[in-house]
Image (spheres, rainbow, N blue to C red):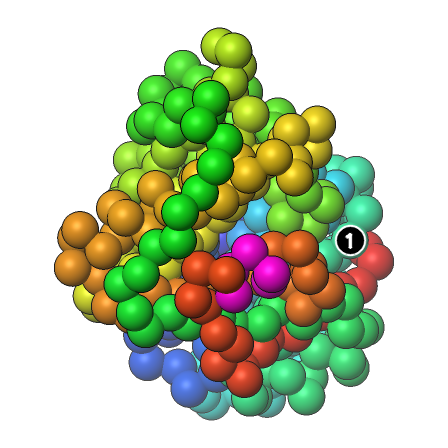
Amino acid sequence: MRPATLADRAALTGLTEHARRTHFHLDWWSVEDWIKESTSGAWVALNGKQIAGTLIAPLEDAPIAWVRLIAIADDYASDDILTALFSVALESLQAAGIESLACLSHPDWLIKRLPRLGFTPFIDVTHYRKDDRSIPDTDAPEVTIRPVTPGELPTVLANDRAAFDPIWWHTLASLQRILRDAADFIVAELDGRIIGHAFSDLYSGQGHLIRLAVHPAYQKRGIGARLLAEALTHLLAAGAYPLTLNTQVDNYTSQSLYRRFGFHPTGDSTTVMMRKT
C-alpha cells in the first residue's frame, strides 16, 4: 500500500475504465484532480508494480470524509484488497481528525461488502422527478435572486454549513468548481446579505437541482420557493427534460416544497452508509 501519485495516472485510468468492480462518487472532480488535491487521501494497492486496486477518500475541511472512488482489478480478490485499502485510509483519516467516513451504497458488488468493512446505514436519499413545465407563483418579493459572484463564495459556504449537517457540507474548493462548471448558480439576497443559494446542472439533456439552501434564520419565508422557481426557470429555458433532484428521506419540509412544484418520488433511493474512523 502507498499513496497514489500523478505518476499513476495512466494505470489508474486503465483500471477505472476496464475493471468490473468500481465505485464512482467523484462529485465535481476527476480522479486526477483528487490525486492532486489529496496528498494522503488517495491510495493504491500494489502487487509488484501492478496496481491491484485503488481507494480515494480525500481529507477535506469537514469532520466527515466521503469515499470518492474504489476500483479493484479483475484478477484480484476484492475482499482482501478492500480490507487493506480501507485500513490505511482510515488510519490516515483518523490522524487528520476526520471523525467518520461515508459511502454511497452502489453498485451491487459493493453494497454487500460495506457492512463487512464496518459501515452501517445512515440515511436514505430519495429521488424526485418533474415531468411538466409548470412553475407555481411564489411570494417573498423583497428578496433579490441573482447569479453568484466568485467573491461571495465564502458567504455561500457559511450559509451552506449553517443549513446542512456536516455530512452534506461542501468545501470552498468544491464551490469554486461548481461555479465554474454548473449550468446555474444563484443566490438570494435580502437587505444586502446573501441568505440562500441554489445550483443546478444539465446531464444528457436532463436538468438536475443539486443544491437548495436557505440560512436557518431566514427559513419559512418563501425564499426557498423563490430560489427553486428561478432555478427551474433557467433549466426549462435551456430545454432540460425531465427535471430531477435528490433529498433525504426524512427532509419532509423540502419534500413538501418539491411536491408543490410538481416533483414526484420515483420510488428509487440510495442509502448512505457510514462508519467511524
Residue 211 horizontal/vertical position (percent): 49, 47
Residue 242 relative to residue 96: left or right: left
Instruction: Determine the residue positioned at 37% across, 33% down.
Output: 186
Residue 205 horizontal/vertical position (percent): 20, 66
Residue 140 relative to residue 103: left or right: left
Label 1: state its secondary structure.
strand
Q: Residues within 10 Å of mark 1 (few under 14, many from 20)?
A: some
Residue 81 falls within the magenta-colored stretch: no
Query: Which quadrant of the structure image shows residue 162?
Result: top right
The kind of residue on which mark 1 rests is Ser
Instruction: Determine the residue positioned at 78% across, 82% down.
Output: 116
Query: Which quadrant of the structure image shows residue 262?
Result: bottom left
- Asked whether residue 224 appears in the rendered view, the answer is yes
- Asked whether residue 246 appears in the rendered view, the answer is no
Query: Magenta stretch: dominant SS?
Result: helix
Question: Magenta segment, which residues?
Answer: 255-259
200 and 15: which one is in front? 200
- The residue under label 1 is 100
